[in-house]
Image: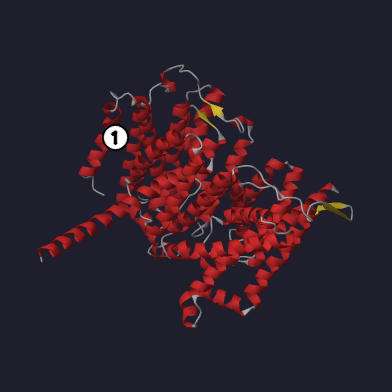
Amino acid sequence: MILLQAAVSGLLLGAVYALFSTGLTLIWGMMNFINFAHGEFVMLGMYAALLATWAGLGPAAFAPAAAAALFLLGAVVYFALIKHVMRGPMLAQILSTFGLALLLRYSSLFIFKSDFRTLPDSALSGTIHVLGLYVARAQLLAGAAAAVVALGMHVLLTRTGLGSRMLAVAEDRSAAMLMGIRPDRMQALAWGLSAASAGLAGALMAVAYPFSPVVGETFALTAFVVVTLGGFGSVPGAMIAGFLIGLVEALAAYLIGPVYKDIVVYALFVAVLWVRPQGLLGARAR
Amino acid sequence: MKPGLGTAALWAALLIFPLAVAGLPSAPFLQDVGSTVVLTAISACAWNIIGGYAGQVSVGHSIFFGTGAYMSLAVFGLWQLPPVAGVPLGVAAAVLLALLIGAPTFRLQGHYFSMATIAVAELIRLTVGNWDLFGAAIGIQGPATPRSGWDLIYRSAVPYYYIDLGVLALVIATTAWMAGGRFGFYLRAIRSDERAARSLGVPVRRVKLLALMLSAAFTAVAGSLYALKVGFVNPESGLGILVSVQMIITAALGGAGTLYGPVLGSIILVPLQSASNSWLGGGGSGLTYILYGGIIMLLARFEPGGLLQFWRRGVPWLRRRLRGGRAADAA
């Protein structure tokens, strides 16, 4: 029973992992670019939610507010930084977002201090009792919302005109330009959506888990594991892998011990790189 | 780069620095900062081999640094050997780790290697932090007092300075030799276009692996030297992400992929850092990393080649401007 309980909360957390990892894999697939500051975007989503509740926003409003704030940040980061390093040397690409990650992490540490925070009690606090399992209401909401939004992202990319335009830019930037698509706009939109997915995931997790400014690194690594396991640029792959990693983490915490859950996940990452570097659903990665 | 006047002046300055400041009242402090400059330059030069010359950006070089530092102190903790006896062990372990990371990720292009280095670094930091053999979260210590000359424990920083300077000379000489030969051309070819390099017959994967192993070996030596001097290492100081950040920013600021760029970066950054630490106290370290993040980002955006590149481009430009200005004045 406890095992089942652990598995359920692992899957719920996995849904949130799936959500922010789809954001990372979107950028990776479209631009062959890894955002090392993605975990910091998640962390900023948590603090955006905190600030929004301080400003008096209710539980239904602060998560979208955090997502909107991060969407803006993502677009700004694209125009101010990414656009200029995108076709530069690999060194510049990696250092740009790595530097951004440090800047965001230590600025947040400076502003918010290293204390762990929680959101104030709201309608989302408390647990519900279903089929003999205890599930935190916030966790359930976070998991459900994350699953819906991640699915929505997939639908957006594969079933809408906007998604086709974004994929066209990913396929061939200059050909897309000749078709009247503005690549800069599409890529900025991708960065906005990616950051918004991270922000929303952060806000949802902030309801259920305590957080501090240094949690970003763990989330960034989790996202790396998920996108690599899921396969290069594959949104469905990232979703499946997200649930899988959430499950593995929860079971490792329960069966081996809480301190070992990250060790198990990172070891899994190394194992994936060794055995199947193209991931579960990946075409052969570039 | 041919050894020129500037290089000779740099080495002369590095050689006489501890003696030149010996008469000053703050000599011990300055000599200590000097030895940190040289040590930081070693690890940054080592990072530069894979990150600069080969263009494969490792963000987890703390793996190799920590391996060196931990091995040096572990041989004392386990078998009462002098820490310097751990150097070959640290180098061997680091080279093995480099193989384990490089072999799978170098089959793929691009960001896989960077992601793998950061993940393995965290994996090792967490593992060591929970492993009693290596002192878990508390860390391990070297000998408190010298038992023989082999323990290399000195009260003054000057002996460390010269030991480190010798190693730095070795690293630079190796890098220069490597960069000048066929191997150096392979590395630069891979950095500018991996696919093109492969199509011209460069054994891309093997070259990248060799460069990573060489880089890891020197980084492990830097870690051992750190452990020798400080006599103590814990998961944060040996394996934390900020250890890697220090190497990256030092090399990138001076000029990644240039022979003396990392040395220049170290000469600029380390004194700044100790000055800000003594002005702002321990609370200043957070500000330092905000600044580091900003500098790394700006470098990537405006001048990925670092200060040396900036200098090479900026000086002729300034000269042209000045000459142009004078011509305009005359007319």
Residue farthest left in this picture: B330
**Residue type of the residue flagged with mark 1:** Leu
Whether A52 is drawn above or below B19: the answer is below
Q: Is residue A21 at all visible to an observer of this figure?
A: no
Of the pair A268 and B200, the residue shown nearer to us: A268
Whether B154 is drawn above or below B10: the answer is above
Number of labels in the image equals: 1
Please, which colouring scheme is shown? Answer: secondary structure
Q: Quadrant of residue B264?
A: top left
User: The C terminus of chain B lies in which quarter of the figure?
Assistant: bottom left
Residue B278 image offset from top left, x and y in percent:
43, 33
Residue at the spot x=59%, y=61% of the render?
A: A70
Chain ID for label 1?
A: B
Whether B22 is drawn above or below B42: the answer is above
Left or right, B236 with respect to B47, comes to right
Q: Is residue B290 at all visible to an observer of this figure?
A: yes
Residue B105 image offset from top left, x and y in percent:
52, 54
Residue at the spot x=35%, y=33% of the render?
A: B34
Q: Residues within 10 Å of mark 1 (few under 14, many from 20)?
A: some
Q: Secondary structure at mark 1?
A: helix
Residue farthest right in this picture: A131
Of the pair A233 and B306, the residue shown nearer to us: B306
- Residue underneath mark 1: B14
Residue at the spot x=58%, y=64% of the render?
A: A71
Residue farthest top in this picture: B147
Residue A167 image offset from top left, x and y in percent:
56, 74
